[in-house]
Image: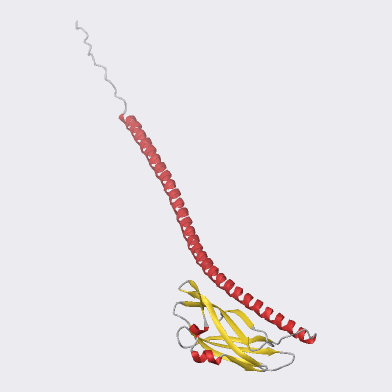
Amino acid sequence: MFSRRYKVVAPKIVQQNSSGKKLLFLLFVGCSVVLSWFAFDYGRLTSGVSRAAYEEKIDERDQTIKQLNQRVEQMRLEIASLQRSSQIDSSAAQLAREDLKRFQQDQAALEREVAFLNSLLTDKAKKAVIRLKHLEITPTDESHQYRIEFTLLHLSKVGGKVQGSVSMSVAGKDSGKPKVLPPEKLMSSGDAKSLKMGFKNFQKFIVTVDFPENFRPESLKIIADPEGKNVEKFVEDLNWKVTKN
C-alpha cells in the first residue's frame, strides 16, 4: 500500500501593495511642498508688507524733510525781509525824526513871527526883528563842499535899514568826535566879507563852505548881528539837511 505523500507548501507571504506607500509618500511630499510653499509665500508676503511699510515711512520722511527744507528757506527769506524791513524802518524813522524836528523849528519860527506881528498891532514891539525866510543846502561838484543859500527878513513897525554882519558855524563829528567849525574854517575870506547886512525888507545870502574829509555835519547855526539897538540879534540852530542834489 502506498503511503500518501503530502507536499508541504510553505506559506506565501503576500507583501503589501507598494502603490499605497507611494501614495502616502507622495501625499507627504505634497503636503510638505504645499506647507513649504505656504511658508515661503507667507514669508514673502509678510516681508513684502514690511518693506512696503518701510518704503511708505521713508516716503513720509522724505516729504517731511522737503517740507522742513521749504520752511527753513521760507524762514531765511522772512529773516532777510525782516532785516531789510528793519533797516528801512530805521531809516524811515530817522527821516521822520529829522522832518519832525524841522517842522517844530518852522513852527517855532512861525509862532515867533506871529507873536511879533501881533505885538506890532498892539504897539508892544520895542525893537525890529530879523527872521530866516528861506534856506537851501546844495552839494557842489567838489568833494566835501556845499553851497548854502538863505534869505533874511526885516520885520519892523517903523521901517528903516538893517546894517550889520552875518556869521555861521557848523557842528558835527570829525572822525566820530564832536567838533564845531567856526566861520574862518568854513569859508574863504571873500565869502566871509560877503555876509554883510544892508537891507530894508529882505536880503539873500549865498556862501560856499568846505569841510574836512572826515567831518560829518549835523547842524547849522546862523547869527545875524545888527548894528545899533533898534533891531534884535538873530540866532538860530538848524538841522543840517541837504535840500538839493
Q: Is residue 168 above or below residue 32?
A: below
Q: Position of residue 94 (x, y in %)?
A: 57, 72
Q: Position of residue 84 (x, y in %)?
A: 52, 69
Viewer-proximal residue, 8 or 20? 20
Name the residue at 53% across, 89% down: 192
Where does the image place residue 171, in percent across and percent down from the top left? 53, 77
Q: Identify the residue shown where x is 43% and y is 43%.
A: 46
View extreme (top): residue:
1
In the image shown, does 146 or 152 lie closer to the viewer? Answer: 152
Q: Please, which residue is most extreme toward the front here? A: 228
The answer to whether 173 is drawn above or below residue 209 in the figure is above
The residue at the point 71 percent across, 80 percent down is 111
Taking the image as drawn, is residue 244 in sight? Answer: no
As drawn, is 187 to the left or to the right of 113? left
Residue at figure coordinates x 31%, y 25% from the top left:
16
Tell which residue pokes out farthest to the left in this image.
2
Q: Quadrant of the N terminus?
A: top left
Q: Is residue 163 visible?
A: yes
Whole-percent x, y for residue 170 in the image: 53, 80
Occupied quadrant, residue 222: bottom right
Above/below status of 4 relative to 177 = above
> Which quarter of the figure has residue 6?
top left
Depth check: give the residue in front, 67 or 210. Answer: 210
